[in-house]
Image (cartoon, helix red, strand yellow):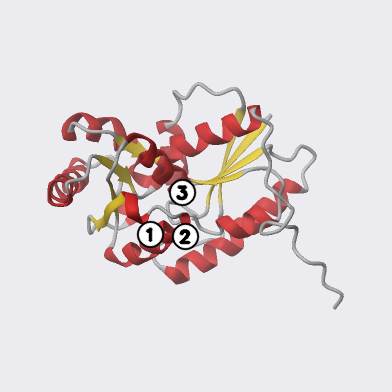
Amino acid sequence: MTIAIINPNASHFMTKQMQASCSNLALQNETLWFECEKSPASIEGHSDGIYAAYHLLEKVRQLENSATPPKAYVIACFDDTGLDAAREITASPVIGIGEAAMHAASFISQNFLVMTTLQRSVGILERNLDHYGLRVRCAGVAASGLPVLSLDADEKSYDIVKQAAHKMLQAKKADALVLGCGGMSHWVDALQQDLGLPVLDGVRIAISFADSFIGLKLSTSKVLGYAWPEAKTS
């Protein structure tokens, strides 16, 4: 059985980077990785998110119509781009890396901090926290000031994120750090060691949840909120 992991942006480099960071996961199911080639190169703000959501849904429809549709999907953008819409067009579980990481953080900490990229993403993630009912468990959402496409293996970029996270963890008295971008996934082990507390990468967590949901035979409810889209006669 297959888990489709879809990067809603167009960055092949970021997709490969996330894939490499997840290579040691012990899974029962096969993973296939995709990006949305016609999407923006990175998702930074509302307009990027809307463009990317459209192409994400097209990718899900394409996979649903394939000979062997995936048994679960992971949306590999911390904004959870197009998440609710994707859940309407498949019965397979659809897991967003943002929702997965923040719920997981609530299992192992009382007060977690989310470290994102640019300040413009803070409001989007705060809105998601409200939607997921997790605002009360979150110490805050902080921005490192680094654009998404600068989150590579560069030591300077790592130091900026580490120092920003350390400062805000102390100021907010948080006891876990959630990485607020899939492009940070390759730093999870180093940050956990340097900061001395749990660091959560939503990419690994969402894939692990998806793998478990397949084993538990859980599917997306089609009764009400995530029912199939209404047929149009025009």
Residue type at mark 2: give it: His
Q: Which residue is mark 2?
A: 131
Residue type at mark 1: give it: Leu
Q: Position of residue 183 (x, y in %)?
A: 37, 46
Please tell me whether residue 145 is drawn above or below residue 109 in the rendered image. below
Query: Dots 3 and 2: beta carbons under 8 Å?
Result: no
Q: Position of residue 176 (x, y in %)?
A: 26, 39
Relative to 122, 69 lies left or right: right
Task: Indicate the quadrant containing the C terminus: top left, top right, bottom left or bottom right.
Answer: bottom right
Q: In the orientation shown, which residue stands out farthest toward the bottom?
A: 234
User: Which is closer to the viewer, label 3 or label 2?
Assistant: 2
Q: Position of residue 12 (x, y in %)?
A: 48, 47
Query: Residue 147: which quarter of the image?
Result: bottom left
Foreground of the two, 71 or 37: 71
Foreground of the two, 220 or 147: 220
User: Which is closer to the viewer, label 1 or label 2?
Assistant: 2
Residue 24 has which mark?
none
Mark-to-mark CA distance, 1 and 2: 10 Å
Q: Which residue is mark 3?
A: 99
SS assignment at label 1: helix
Q: Which residue is mark 1?
A: 125
Please tell me whether residue 176 is drawn above or below residue 25 in the rendered image. below
